[in-house]
Structures are given as structure tokens and as C-alpha cells.
Image (tube, helix red, strand yellow):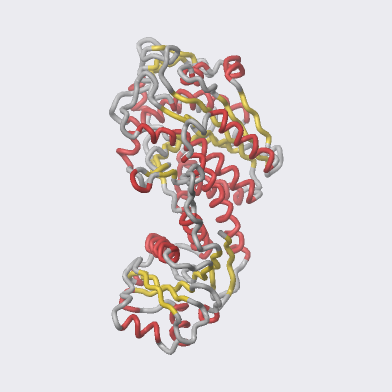
Amino acid sequence: MEFSIKQSNSEKQRSACVVVGVYAGGKLSPAALALDRIAQHHLSEVIARGDMDGKLANTLVLHRVPGIVAERVLLVGLGKAAEFSAKQFIDAVRASLGALHKTASKDAVFYLTDLAVKGRDEAWKIKQCVLHAAESVFRCDQLKSKPADAPALRKLQLGCADKPGTAAQTALEQAKAIASGMALTKTLGNLPGNICTPTYLADQATAMAKTHKLKVTILEEKDMEKLGMHSLLSVSHGSRQPAKLITLEYQGADKKQKPIVLVGKGITFDSGGISLKPGAEMDEMKYDMCGAASVLGTLQAIAEMKLKLNVVIVIPSSENLPDGSASKPGDIVKSMSGQTIEILNTDAEGRLVLCDALTYAARFEPDTVVDIATLTGACVIALGHVASGLFSNEDKLAKELLAAGDEAQDRAWHMPLWDDYQQQLDSNFADMQNIGGRAAGSITAACFLSRFTKDYRWAHLDIAGTAWKSGKEKGATGRPVPLLTQYLINRAAAK
């Protein structure tokens, strides 16, 4: 979809559809009021008849409105003006897009970005409109023999009363880049495990490196063996697909600037290994590489933005399958750090690949390391599908990520990482065991990772509840690309 932003008058738009808001009680937004005057109060009369009550997310399409050159006028309910905030704005945007897609409109002009939203500026409104519009037209049907017809809506102009400044144009370009990164993340996440293998992810990284002139390094199993990554390699033993350790380096700033390293879990299919998962919904374990997909999407976004920052992504990638060579409960392996791990549950494999990747990340002398992983079902129980779990060994870093998530409307929740939980990982036979029991499962998983991150400031995002949706709307969400990109944008601005 094409996006643009322009100073314009709603009543003079020659478009397929003009989108304006109506508050509860029939109060017209400024753009709607301008239309109503030209249309000799036609909109007011429609509202007075009760066809539009202004309730949040209600919509009404009007055709051939007197005096209006646009083919259609779409009225969208905004709810009570005094309660109109970020959530209400997003609900109105989504409702508008849903209504637009039910028409044959090939282009539309949005006047929702001119609405006053508590605590949010114009840049935020622009980003949300673009991201939700891009989401509304995203399709993942390339593997169908007959893909669905593309949505009719191809162009969206964001209308504004005042001439858009540099901040507005920057927000638009950033939003388009984030949407592009999210589309890549969703596409990779939705691919089945027989296509999206560790080798496939490595090929995608290599292609991205060529497009954006990045440095790419792919470590094979023999390379990882030499480095002592026996924890990571223990996960791939049961698979015929070779594990890969993928790194991409983006240099947008001076070489002396320490990079931010993003580590994405890349388990391209997780059967649980010998600790086999139940069969129901096991197909969704193709999404266990959404951490890897999200760091690839984030890197693509910042490369398109040409962000002035140095960023490295590290992807430990493997399948987790059972066969005669697979790791068994009770096996003990040595990690790259030299610490030994008793594997009590082979389905807690994400932390086994991440711990070696986190040790490897130290060689980049990072300013910050953030790992992203669909790590624990316990995090879904704790936070549902609304917020990602956030753990960190530094409160300042946690606050930075929380603020970025709030700004991007891709929220996380700060979870404890207290030493009190570490004892649950004690082992009689190794330095630690890879699970800490049912209690506080997401916390003990983070505690496990923290043992490999003592040399730098680090945060962990558990996205098990936010990376994809199940049921009728099954599919990858593209999260937490908005959070990560906003964090990097904020860091670049601070530099």
C-alpha cells in the first residue's frame, strides 16, 4: 500500500472515500464539520435520524453526499470525546479500515490523524495509522494454489489541517519501514517447518545482507563444535537439519560506537524432542522461530530508515526433534561459557540455544544485548496475549524498553529477576539444570539466561504470548518489531 501525508481540506478531496470521525452524541470532528457545511448539513441530518450514533468503532458509508466531490464519506464513531485516548483512537482506525475494505475504494483520505489524542502527538498518530493499514492488507497465502484477490485499497493519504513538518514526514517514513519489517517477520513466522529450516533462515539473512550491504556470518555445526557450543548443538542432535548460528552486522554509526546486539531464538520447529509435546496444536510450533524472525524484521526496518546506530543480530537456529541421537532427559552438556547443564526436559530447548548465543554475543563488545524468544508457556499464563514478558539485569534498560513499548503500542511488562529464584535451578550433578519446576516458570527461564549475561547489560523479552495468534485469526503478529525499532530509534536519537 502507498502512504502519503498532505495538508488538505476534507471537503475538497477527489478521492474514492474521505474518512472522518463522529463523537458520541453526534458531535462532529473538525474535518466532519467542514464536510457538513459544504453538504448543507447532510451529515447532521443523517446523524439526527439515528443512522450514526458516534459510538466507538461504529461506521457508516455515505454515497453521493451533496456538494462533496469524493465518491464516498465514511463516518466512524469515536465514542465519548472526554474518553478519547490511545486505545479509542486505534479502535477507530481499525474500524475505519475494516469498513473501507468492504467497499471498492482504491484510495482514501484519512482525517483521523487530526484528532486530539490524550498524551499522543502527531507522529504517534501517523505511525499507528500506517501500521494498522499495512496490517489490514497483509496476506500470507503465497503457498495457496489460488491466492485471494488483493484488497482494493491501494493508496492511503493522511490528511491534516496544518502543513506537515519534518517530524510528521519522519514518522511516516519510519512507519513504512516498521511495516516492512513486520511483514517480513510475519511471513517468516507463518512459513511451515518443511520450508523455513535453519538453512532457509541463513539464506534469508544472506539475501538481506546483499540488499542492505550488511556483514553476514553463518557458523556451521563444525564451527560451533570448535567454539564449544555443546548446549546449542545438543538441541539439533535429533534433527536431520543442521543447526546454524547466523549473525548480521549493521553499521550506521562510527565504528567506535559499541553495538546493540539483538539475539533471536530460531527454533524452526519444536516437537519437544524426547520430552514430546501433545499433538494438539503442535503445528503452531513452527512459530518457535518468531524471535529470529523479529530480529530480522527489526534489522530490515532500521536499514531502510538508515538509522545512525550500530546493531548486530545473532540467531541460534535449530530444529528440536526426537530420534536415536536426540538429547535425553538427564543428559549433561557443557555450554560455550564452560558452565555445565543437566537437561531435565528437552522441551526447554530455547534456553539451551540462547545461552551459547548470549555467550557468543560478548565478542562484539556490546553496549546492550536484548534477546527475544518464544520461551515459556508460563509467560502466556502470566500475561496472556497482551504484553510480552520483560526481564533485565538493569532497571534503567528495562525502563527504556518499557517506554519504547508504550510509545509503539507494543507493550511489555517488567517481571522480577531476583536471586531468590535462582536456587530452583540447582542440580546435584551439574552447574545448573535447564528447568526450575512449574512455579515461576518464565522467571526461572530468565534466571537461567542471566547466568550467561554477567559481562554486559542485558534484557530478555519472552514473546510466547504475543508472537502469534491461534484460532480463526491464526498467524504471526510481527511483534515485538514495533517495540524493538522504537527502542533503537530512541537510542539513535539519544546518541
- At 44% from the left and 70% from the top, the residue drawn is 116
Residue found farthest to the front? 145
Pinpoint residue 443: horizontal percent, then vertical percent: 36, 32
Please tell me which residue lies in front, 401 or 230.
230
Answer with left or right where residue 423 lies relative to residue 409: left
Give residue 363's quadrant in the image.
Answer: top right
Q: Is residue 12 above or below residue 475?
A: below
How far from the left and from the top, in percent, is residue 33? 44, 82
Q: Is residue 183 visible?
A: yes
Q: Which image quarter: residue 89?
A: bottom left
Point out residue 198 in the picture as x, y percentages from the top left corner: 54, 28
- Report the front residue among 369 and 267: 267
Q: Is residue 442 above or below residue 466?
A: above
**Point 31% across, 83% down: residue:** 48
Residue 118 visible here: no
- What residue is at 50 percent from the left and 21 percent from the top? 232
Of the 4 image quadrants, the one containing the N terminus is bottom right
Left or right: residue 431 versus residue 457 is left
128 or 243: nearer the viewer = 243
Q: Nearer the viewer, residue 341 or 192?
A: 192
Residue at the farthest top position? 429
What is the number of callouts on the image?
0
Quarter holding residue 300 = top right
Q: Residue furthest bottom?
A: 40
Residue 34 position, x and y percent, is 47, 82
